[in-house]
Image (cartoon, rainbow, N blue to C red):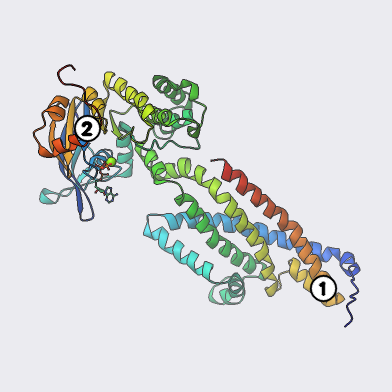
């Protein structure tokens, strides 16, 4: 058995712009899904926590649905099925962003909810005893305390969303993984191309992971 | 009518459990009322119904002769409904201090005492800060205003909680076993604070197990049993000449608290 592989990274280096463009698209998907997902998740979390059935019920349905259907299936569904049952045109990029946002929202909703619920009922009571209305207590007493507890898990969720962006490649969105696939099809160097992709992801995500450990330690200590 | 707080037929049930079975009480201005009773007799529930942390199941509460809540329906079917905004404004007039201090841990002592003034009473920051300092001065904590609650002793935290409630200028103060969570050596400073409030003429209802303290500060003692006021009277009446077997039994259980000798005191 011959075990001497001729690594050919030149074809990667000469075509760095293809991967750079892929990276750009990956960043775009990440930025959009992080903002939309974590933002919408906040309101879903409040909805799930709400005392009012009209907020709680739809939030629960949404969260349970998108937590229990794999993100990949949701992406494919948004791309192929959604345009048929709705009047909207959905291109691959939009479908991918929607699906990953929705997944991130569903998972982060419970992080927010758990954060709010982790605040002792005594804090609510102290606020109410001072005459503070519900929303004032949320805003002034509960959120400032809950935020410390939700930031570390939200950071992990954010990292997960960046990883999920690679799923967009199955519907031919030109992100990093898909760019590597295209490169390898032209230059017959899949090993080098995917190695490069793996390295790039590692270089992006590893610092984020370190950062989340740091936050966890930092915020865990302060109260 | 000189009653500042008047409670009529106040009842409270949790599901099928009837906790308060009709409380009638008239509290005069500047009166200090101590509520005694066995665990589970409904003392906390009674206080919590007075400032609507729990909604009474039925009954009326008048504060300064004003009915709290809105009467709906006619004849037999009257019931009282409450709007959040009404309850919030009522709660600013009835201050409450809890066993567990419940300070806001993310705010300094000064911010704790300013919070309700700014967000609820809409006072200007500068006014709220001045009022807070005045109140903190009275509980001897001016040197702690920039500390966070976690850096204070239990007694200090409880005094901040009292200052926080008083800064709202309540008409009535409710104290629910405010010394029960404290180390014995810290109880005195909190009781001293309450005593000086009494001397200033604050109207107060307090639940406590400190019978000696009750003897000295109470104008009237209520003995609560199974959700009803079984007996009430002056500290002398209740602590030394109780007519009810239940009360006597309860007082016996508190023999550890040495009562002042009625002859010499
Ligand atoms: N939120 C609630 N839901 C259900 N039951 C409750 C609730 N709050 C109080 N109870 C019940 O009401 C009864 C009276 O409780 P409460 O706390 O008023 O007693 P207490 O006299 O303050 O007792 P303690 O001296 O132990 O504080 C108890 O049987 C308690 O279990
Ligand atoms: Mg109690």
Question: Left or right: where does residue A123 sit relative to residue B44?
Answer: right
Quadrant in which the N terminus of chain B is drawn: top left
Q: Hey, which residue is sitting farthest bottom in the picture?
A: A1
Q: Which quadrant of the picture is home to ligand 2?
A: top left
- On the image, numbered disc 2 is attached to which residue? B255
Q: Hey, which residue is sitting farthest left in the picture?
A: B243
Judge by depth and name the residue closer to the eye, B84 or A127.
A127
Chain ID at mark 2 = B
Judge by depth and name the residue closer to the eye, B212 or B231.
B212
The percent coordinates of residue B42 (x first, y second) are 22, 43
Say which residue appears at 28% left-offset and 38% top-offset.
Answer: B51
- On the image, numbered disc 1 is attached to which residue? A191
Say which residue appears at 10% left-offset and 36% top-offset.
Answer: B244
Say which residue appears at 63% left-offset and 47% top-offset.
Answer: A215
Q: Is residue B59 visible?
A: yes
Say which residue appears at 30% left-offset and 35% top-offset.
Answer: B177
Q: Hey, which residue is sitting farthest front in the picture?
A: B256
Q: Is residue B63 visible?
A: no
Quadrant in which the C terminus of chain B is drawn: top left
Judge by depth and name the residue closer to the eye, A5 or B93.
A5
């Amino acid at each position: 058995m011959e075990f001497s592989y001729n690594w050919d990274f030149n074809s990667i280096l000469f075509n760095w712009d293809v991967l750079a463009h892929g990276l750009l698209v990956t960043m775009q998907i990440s930025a959009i899904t992080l903002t939309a997902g974590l933002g919408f998740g906040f309101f879903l979390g409040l909805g799930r926590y709400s005392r009012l059935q009209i907020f709680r019920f739809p939030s629960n349905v949404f969260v349970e649905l998108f937590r229990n259907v794999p993100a990949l299936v949701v992406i494919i569904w948004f791309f192929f099925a959604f345009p048929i049952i709705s009047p909207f045109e959905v291109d691959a990029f939009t479908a991918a962003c929607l699906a990953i946002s929705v997944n991130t929202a569903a998972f982060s909703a419970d992080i927010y909810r758990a954060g709010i619920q982790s605040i002792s009922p005594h804090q609510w009571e102290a606020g109410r005893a001072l005459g503070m209305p519900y929303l004032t207590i949320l805003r002034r007493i509960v959120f400032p305390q809950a935020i410390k507890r939700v930031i570390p898990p939200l950071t992990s969720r954010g990292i997960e969303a960046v990883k999920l962006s690679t799923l967009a490649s199955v519907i031919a969105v030109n992100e990093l993984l898909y760019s590597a696939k295209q490169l390898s099809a032209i230059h017959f160097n899949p090993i080098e191309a995917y190695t490069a992709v793996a390295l790039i992801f590692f270089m992006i995500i590893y610092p984020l992971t370190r950062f989340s450990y740091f936050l966890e330690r930092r915020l865990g200590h302060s109260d | 009518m000189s009653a500042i707080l008047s409670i009529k037929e106040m009842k409270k049930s949790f599901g099928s459990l009837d906790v308060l079975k009709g409380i009638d009480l008239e509290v005069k201005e500047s009166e200090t009322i101590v509520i005694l009773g066995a665990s589970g007799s409904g003392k906390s529930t009674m206080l919590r119904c007075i400032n609507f942390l729990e909604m009474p199941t039925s009954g009326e509460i008048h504060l300064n002769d004003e009915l709290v809540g809105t009467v709906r329906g006619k004849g037999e079917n009257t019931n009282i409904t409450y709007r959040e905004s009404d309850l919030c404004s009522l709660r600013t007039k009835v201050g409450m201090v809890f066993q567990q201090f419940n300070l806001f841990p993310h705010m300094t002592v000064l911010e704790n005492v300013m919070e309700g003034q700014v967000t609820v009473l809409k006072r200007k920051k500068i006014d709220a800060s001045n009022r807070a300092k005045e109140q903190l001065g009275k509980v001897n904590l001016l040197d702690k205003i920039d500390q966070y609650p976690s850096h204070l002793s239990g007694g200090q935290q409880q005094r901040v909680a009292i200052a926080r409630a008083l800064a709202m200028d309540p008409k009535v103060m409710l104290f629910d076993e405010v010394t029960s969570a404290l180390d014995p050596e810290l109880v005195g400073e909190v009781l001293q604070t309450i005593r000086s409030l009494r001397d200033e003429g604050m109207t107060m209802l307090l639940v406590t197990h400190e019978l000696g303290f009750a003897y000295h500060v109470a104008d009237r003692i209520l003995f609560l049993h199974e959700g009803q006021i079984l007996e009430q009277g002056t500290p002398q009446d209740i602590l030394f000449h109780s007519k009810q077997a239940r009360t006597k039994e309860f007082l016996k259980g508190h023999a550890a608290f040495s009562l002042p000798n009625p002859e010499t005191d």
